[in-house]
Image (tube, helix red, strand yellow):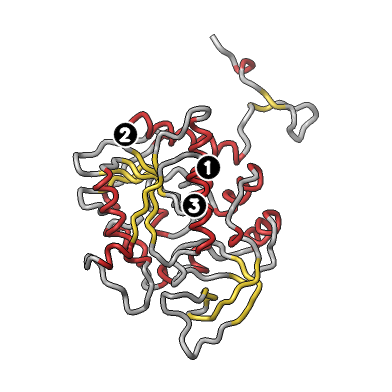
Amino acid sequence: MSTATDSPVRADGPGHGAQRPYALAHLEALEAESVHIFREVAGEFERPVILFSGGKDSIVMLHLALKAFAPAPVPFSLLHVDTGHNFPEVIAYRDRVAAEHRLRLRVARVQDFIDDGRLRERPDGTRNPLQTVPLLDAIQTGRFDAVFGGGRRDEEKARAKERVFSPRDEFGAWDPRRQRPELWQLYNGRHAPGEHVRVFPLSDWTELDVWQYIAREEIELPRIYYAHEREVFARGGMWLTAGEWGGPKASEPVERRLIRYRTVGDMSCTGAVDSDAATVTDVIAEIAASRLTERGATRADDKMSEAAMEDRKREGYF
């Protein structure tokens, strides 16, 4: 029979030689939880896929997947919904990482759906809301029954409502009333034929956790996440990068500023922030002092209405 003294102890408490049960450090606990989620999905589902855009959250998610199955290869392919308006340096990073780890990368292109008439360009030029149809088509075509995403609960209030395993119906739609309890890290992957489950290994992470983990693991990111000079213009209270998507207008002068991106996506709706944070340490200090979430500060598509994200999620968006 085990006793309390059988448990590992630590003697680094505030008292003289005080002992307390051993506990994982914060980042170690988050990493262990995420690794467990990846392995749970591998055991429960037949055809999982990882959404990978080359953004920091998907990069950390892939890093965790590599750890979860090492020394074996990751048993999932990668999927990216490319709007055609993504940052070139991020797309280059995406392709290089997929090749480096010999992972199959599937790319669903919004442009293909516009060309064949299944989608129409929006008047404002942004394609972020157009990602839902290509995403659902790729899931159906690939017969994926579990789809990993890098969403975190601290990003946005709609994402805060989702469980780690989030079931979607046969149309890819999300219903908050179908959320299942996840007590003691027990995950229910049950789903009917034609349905699938979205899985969020980073649900319990914060933006600061992600950056501290990047620092600890020395994970390489696209340079866009660090301070660099770039030609930008002001629109809707944000600094946007000029591009073929429709910006800037004649009344929007282009400036060269020292900026960085807290999140990356479609250039038409992803804003930069003024920053001189050129290293991981600088970024961590900057985020620790911030009172705005990354999406709240830099994503125009989340400002379309009070429930913009939730409305898109109900339609099948991530």
Q: With 13 as the anchor, is 134 left or right in this view? A: left
Q: How far separated are the C-alphas under marks 3 and 2?
A: 25 Å
Is 222 in front, or is 264?
222
- The percent coordinates of residue 306 (x first, y second) are 37, 70
Instruction: Tell me the amino acid under the disc marked 3.
Output: Arg
- Please name which of the two marks, 1 or 2, marks the residue nearer to the observer: 1
Asked if residue 93 is positioned above or below residue 274 in the image, the reply reads above
Which amino acid, by three-letter code, is at mark 2? Phe
Which residue corresponds to the image point at 29% horizontal and 51% vertical from the top-left? 138
The label shown at residue 45 is 2
Q: Which residue is mark 1?
A: 100
Callout 1: few (<14), some (14-19), or many (20+) C-alpha neighbours within 10 Å? Answer: few
In contact (CB < 8 Å): disc 1 and disc 3: no
Quadrant location of the N terminus?
A: top right
**Which of pointers 1 and 3 lies earlier in the amino acid sequence?**
3
For the residue pair 90 and 115, the one nearer the viewer reads as: 115
Q: Which mark is residue 94?
A: 3
- The residue tagged with tag 3: helix, strand or loop? helix
- How many angstroms separate mark 1 from mark 3 (CA)? 10 Å
